[in-house]
Structures are given as structure tokens and as C-alpha cells.
Amino acid sequence: MNPSHTLRSLMLLALVATTTGAATAEDARLLRSPAIDAEHVAFVHANDIWIADRDGGEARRLTTFQGAETDPHFSPDGTMVAFSGEYDGNVDVYVVPVEGGEPRRLTWHPGDDDVRGWTPDGERVVFASGRLNAPLPVPRFFTVSTAGGPPEPLPVPRVCEGQISADGGRLVYQEILQWESEWRNYRGGQNNPVRIIDLDTLEVEKLPWDPTVRSKDVSPTWLGGRVLLLSDRDHAMNVWSFDPASGELAQRTFFTEFDCKGLESGPGAVVFENGGWLYLLDADADEPVKLE
């Protein structure tokens, strides 16, 4: 073979390999359980937590261990990430600086403690645990100080997921943990409405929900004064918003092929997964933006 032809072939192969590698790096998938703050997004990939700039770009691994690290949530000031760590054969609450470092353990119960967020003052981590309920470990919310000490329960007997409002006065939540979460358009007894409870008066408001249709409403979170949630009212799981002041319920995304999952709010926006990719939806935007 002509040496010049061989050289050109090698150069072409190198170019194709470089281009393919770059495209793969820009199009990462299988990203789950995202979180967002003013500057960063965090997510789970291969049972480790990764962090990147809020608009995407290169990600760096924040945690690494043989066990699973899941449920990342940024502190209100953006300096810490709380997460559920499967260390020492059990799932407990941990915190780690956004710059990285050794995680610090906050809970020690033999049952699972699953991180759900932070209190608005940033001094305590919110987590779900079945430690007080018998005979079944039905979860409820607790908070634990980042300085250590015993966890304290919130005054709601059954909560699997949700978020405390920015003023600390209300909790939007789901009572029942759905164990068949991948069943699209499921209409059985696991379905139940999203609720808002006043943490002072304990008065409860249910979001609009038709018991004859029984839409699957999950992952409620606050964005300003509105509640954003995931619902399959249009036969695919999409992002919806609810205004407690007006009672208006509106669909915000319109995906059909894959369900939206892992909705989480941050300053001015929510982040979620769809088809293994992450999307950012600003508070007043009409269309979500895919993160590269």
C-alpha cells in the first residue's frame, strides 16, 4: 500500500475516533435524581453523585464508593449537598461540600433514611424514615441538624416525598410511596392526591384530583408561590404547575415518548429527567431546555 495512503487512512481513523468520543461526552445519558441551585446541577450516575454548572458542561464526580449514593439536594446557600449514602450496609443521611471532600454522617438508625431536602434556614436536612411507625415502616419526615444530634419528626404522620415552602410554613407532600412507579397510567389504590399542610394549624388542602380518573401525581415541589409536580393526566408523566391562590392547574411540558422523573426545584427553575437526559425549566418559560 502506498505509504501516503496509509498515513491518510490513519489520520481519518483518528479524526473519526476523536469526533465520536466528543459527541459521546456531550450526550451523556442515564442521569437520574437531579438537583439544582443558583450555580450548579447535581445528579446520580452509576450510583455516584456528580456535579456540573447549572447550564451543563463538564461534570465532576462528587462522591465515590462501592455502595449507592443517591438523592442529592443542595443546601439553600449552595455550599453543601445532602444525600442518601449506602455506607456500612445501611442507608443514612450524609452531607458533603460542593467542592468535594469526605462525607459527614448525620443519622445512625438501622432503617433507611432517605434525604428529601433542607429546611429553609439551611441548618437541618429533611429525610424520610419509617423509624417510628409500626408494625410497618411507613415513612414520615424528620429533620436532623448539620451540627449533629437526634432527629426531630415533623407533625405529619405519613409522608414519602415533598418539600417545605421557603417561608417554612407549609409542606407540599405525597403520603404513599408507590411501589409500582413504572406502571404508566396506573389507576389503582396506590394513587392519592398531592396535599399541602399548614405546619402551624395542620389544616390540609388537596390539589385538584379526580378520584374517578386517579391520575398519578408525584414529586411535588415549590417554585416561588406555586407547586410544581409530575402527573400523567395526559397519559404520559409531565410537569404541571398549581397556583394555591387561584386554584389553577396547568400543564408545563408535553413529552410523549418518555416519562418525566425526579422533579426538583431551585432558584427560579426546576430540573428533571426525561429519557435519561436532564432538562431545565425556568419558572415562566414555555419550553424546557435540555442540558448537555
Image (cartoon, helix red, strand yellow):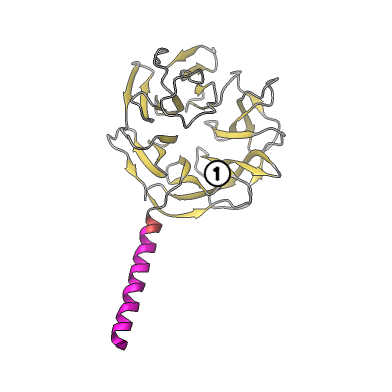
**Main secondary structure found in the magenta portion:** helix
Decide if residue 64 is on the left or right side of residue 22: right
Q: Quadrant of the N terminus?
A: bottom left
- In the shown orientation, is residue 21 left or right of residue 70? left
Q: Is residue 124 visible?
A: no
Q: Camera-side residue: 26 or 95?
A: 26
Report the front residue among 71 and 142: 71
Q: Is residue 160 above or below residue 56?
A: above
Q: Amino acid at mark 1?
A: Met
Query: Does 181 sit left or right of 258 as displayed?
Result: right
Residue at 71% x, 36% y: name it: 108
The percent position of residue 282, horizontal first and vertical second, equals: 34, 37
Give the residue displayed 45% in from the left and 47% down from the top.
Answer: 30
Residue 22 visible within the image: yes
Front-most of residues 145 and 22:
22
Instruction: Give the residue at x 61% y 25%.
Output: 139
Please determine whether, in this image, residue 38 is positioned above or below residue 221: below
Residue drawn 34% across the image and 73% down it: 13
What residue sits right under mark 1 in the picture?
80
Q: Is residue 268 above or below residue 186?
A: below
Give, as a single range, the part of the protein colored magenta.
1-23
Q: What is the secondary structure assignment of the residue under circle 1?
A: strand
